[in-house]
Image (cartoon, rainbow, N blue to C red):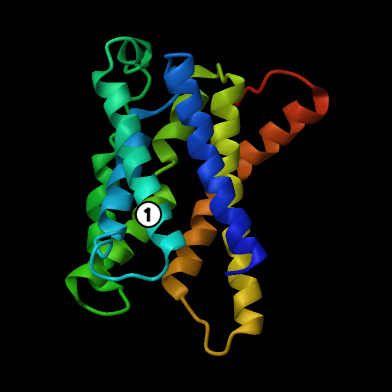
Amino acid sequence: MNVFRLAGDMTHLLSVVVLLLKIHTIKSCAGVSLKTQELYALVFAARYLDLFVHFVSLYNTVMKLVFLASSFSIVWYMRKHKIVRRTYDKDHDTFRHYFLVLPCLLLALLINERFTFREVMWAFSIYLEAVAIFPQLVLLQRTRNIDNLTGQYVFFLGAYRVLYILNWIYRYFTEPHFVHWISWVAGIVQTLLYADFFYYYIMSWKKNVKLELPA
């Protein structure tokens, strides 16, 4: 654990809190991609298969439970809540997210740290997380109507990955033999996907205008 890892975890947690705050208090999921949320639920389900068989620390276990519970609860709200589901923009959230799942699974079968079920599922979750934001970014570009909470959610989600890259750099120079190419490459790809959004988010903040992405 280091300051970059902790900041990354807290930023990731903050992104979830912002999204749940919007959904639970405002009773709206407008501008939020259900496809992305379903992908994140799959990411955490695949990554945390070791939840009850491999104990690292209380902090680690609690964070796993929080991300699992929050991701599935968000999907439930958007699919089943009688008020929230009415605000879901299914006409614009049409990205075929299942086309992302199979290539990530095949890649995990080919490139993994060890060819065991849990390790393949871990690699699959890393690859899938790298592209899970795609449907969300596409939805924001199509609607161009981005409220503050949705913009903050995506920004914090991207910032978490940037902080994790700093964490990896720190660990590379302070820990012997710290090499995780799968996480590194996928993390860089994931961060690059946010680059365009970061630019327009920062520009809108500097100019104090409503955030809009180019169509």
How crowded pointer 1 is (Cα within 10 Å; few <14, some 14-19, many 20+) is rated as some
Q: Amino acid at mark 1?
A: Lys
Quadrant of residue 108 in the image? bottom left
The percent coordinates of residue 13 (x first, y second) are 51, 44
Query: Measured along the vertical axis of the image, is residue 126 above or below residue 182?
Result: above
Q: Classify residue 68 as left or right of residue 214.
A: left
Give the number of callouts. 1
Outermost residue toward the right? Answer: 207
Residue at position x 57%, y 61% in the image: 164
Residue 107 visible somewhere in the drawing:
no
Outermost residue toward the left? Answer: 117
Residue bearing mark 1: 64
Residue at position x 81%, y 24% in the image: 207
Nearer to the camera, 121 or 69:
69
Quadrant of residue 213 in the image? top right
Residue at position x 58%, y 47% in the image: 11
Residue 208 visible somewhere in the drawing:
yes
The percent coordinates of residue 70 (x first, y second) are 37, 38
- Label 1 secondary element: helix
